[in-house]
Image (cartoon, rainbow, N blue to C red):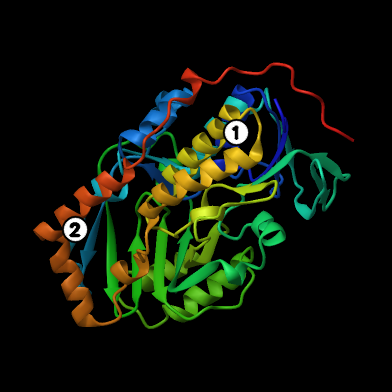
């Protein structure tokens, strides 16, 4: 089998999922992760429909995911006085099974840590394609050569920047920002996994959510592109405090609590547009780096399905990356359309009072029910090949070349 050594950048969801399948098919895999260790907690992510659950089942992790699932949380939209206006069902926001991102990452890491090399606290700084491999330089580690490199490093992918071009060419700001702050109550194993309610309040161009499965607090607001360091919690806190200073309801108390949170994440609602070309030379992208659309509701499912397809096609092609990458692009170009051109900010944060009223009406209408059915159909709109049925695992993986 050709191209047996693979470097994956990113140890969140897509990276370990891909590492699992590649090892199963006989590849030698290294995963490099910028963070010094697995990131615990994080916002809740979910899986929707037969296709997503089938991949988890074939990986042998579905039972573990279900065992650590969050409870179902309905989001209740209220006015200034706390009167109920509309309800966004947790059956929609939480899919068939919802789990904290950190818990899912831990499950996938535990599934692969004995068979995959993990390098934490480092990142790729340079990629050079040669006639027979990829020469990789790291911020801290020595240079190494791999047959293939995969970017599974999120919407702000370093691999995509190095191999395809600047982020501005592919990541398109959709006019909104979101912020999650405070560890979700579901991170405490002692909290019963029962149906719960979170409360949300809108003013034109702004949304604040008190509680919920994503985090203790969530904010969303309309804004042009902002210039701030994404890993600076203090900068994120200042932006939220300034943006929401004049909002009523529970917001003054939420902002007071925000001052005590260290786990604050603020980022744009953006969409990655690769025009269906998720590979270039010996480099491939999977997950949000390839087809991310912030808060669109299908990102984690796309990540695990994309990892399954990429590894399966590489194994089917006996490591021929040209053949495998072409098949991966073709399959995922069609399936990734489920992320679509949707903008969660436009739906959850209307710019006018009339828009808020119309959104609330829509949530209780038959049109919303039809939208749910369309989403369920789209999540399963792929012919999921049973790769293990016709791929023979190669056991003679060669060592990494110096």
Above or below — where is 94 with respect to 55? below
The answer to whether 36 appears left or right of 264 in the picture is right
| Label 2 Cα neighbours within 10 Å, binned few <14 / some 14-19 / many ≥20 | some
The residue where tag 2 is placed is 87
For the question of whether residue 184 can be seen, the reply is no
**Helix, strand or loop for disc 1:** helix
Q: Is residue 196 left or right of residue 31?
A: left
Distance (Cα) linking label 1 and label 2: 44 Å
The quarter of the picture where the N terminus appears is top right
Along the viewing direction, whichever of 119 and 167 lies nearer the viewer: 167
**Vertical placement of 60 versus 183: above or below?**
above
Residue that sits furthest to the left in the current view? 366
Circle nearer the N terminus (1, 2):
2
Q: Residue at 39% across / 73% down in the picture?
A: 252
Residue 68 is situated, as x and y percent measured from the top left of the image, at 42, 32
Q: Secondary structure at mark 2?
A: strand
Q: Who is closer to the viewer here, 29 or 81?
A: 29
Residue under the point 50% across and 70% down: 172
Q: Which residue is mark 1?
A: 314
Location of residue 198 (image quadrant): bottom left
Q: Is residue 364 above or below residue 243?
A: above
Disc number lying in front (1 or 2)? 1
């Amino acid at each position: 089998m050709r191209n047996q050594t693979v470097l994956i950048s990113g140890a969140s969801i897509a990276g370990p999922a891909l590492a699992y399948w590649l090892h199963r098919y006989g590849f030698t895999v290294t995963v490099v992760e910028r963070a010094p260790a697995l990131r615990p907690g994080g916002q809740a992510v979910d899986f929707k429909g037969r296709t997503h659950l089938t991949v988890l089942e074939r990986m042998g992790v579905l039972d573990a995911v279900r065992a650590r699932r969050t409870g179902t949380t309905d989001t209740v939209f209220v006015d200034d006085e706390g009167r109920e206006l509309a309800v966004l069902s947790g059956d929609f926001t939480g899919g068939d099974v919802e789990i904290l991102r950190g818990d899912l990452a831990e499950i996938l890491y535990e599934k692969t840590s004995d068979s995959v090399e993990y390098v934490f606290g480092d990142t790729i700084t340079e990629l050079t394609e040669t006639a027979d491999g990829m020469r990789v330089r790291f911020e801290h580690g020595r240079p190494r050569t791999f047959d293939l490199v995969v970017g599974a490093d999120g919407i702000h992918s370093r691999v995509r920047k190095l191999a395809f071009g600047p982020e501005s060419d592919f990541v398109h700001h959709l006019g909104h920002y979101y912020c999650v702050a405070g560890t979700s109550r579901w991170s405490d194993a002692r909290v019963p996994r029962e149906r719960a309610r979170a409360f949300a309040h809108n003013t034109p161009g702004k949304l604040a959510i008190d509680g919920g499965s994503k985090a203790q607090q969530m904010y969303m607001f309309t804004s042009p592109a902002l210039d701030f360091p994404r890993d600076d919690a203090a900068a994120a806190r200042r932006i939220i405090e300034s943006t929401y200073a004049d909002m009523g309801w529970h917001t003054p108390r939420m902002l007071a609590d925000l001052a005590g949170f260290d786990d604050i994440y603020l980022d744009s609602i953006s969409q990655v547009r690769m025009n269906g070309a998720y590979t270039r030379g010996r480099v491939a992208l999977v997950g949000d780096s390839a087809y991310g659309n912030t808060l669109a509701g299908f990102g984690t499912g796309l990540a695990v399905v994309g990892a399954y397809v990429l590894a399966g096609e590489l194994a089917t092609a006996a490591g021929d990356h040209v053949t495998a990458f072409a098949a991966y692009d073709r399959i995922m170009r069609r399936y990734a359309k489920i992320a679509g051109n949707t903008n969660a900010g436009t739906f959850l944060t209307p710019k006018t009072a009339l828009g808020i009223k119309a959104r609330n009406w829509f949530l209780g209408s038959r049109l919303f029910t039809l939208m749910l059915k369309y989403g369920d159909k789209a999540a399963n709109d792929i012919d999921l090949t049973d790769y293990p049925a016709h791929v023979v695992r190669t056991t003679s993986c060669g060592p990494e070349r110096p």
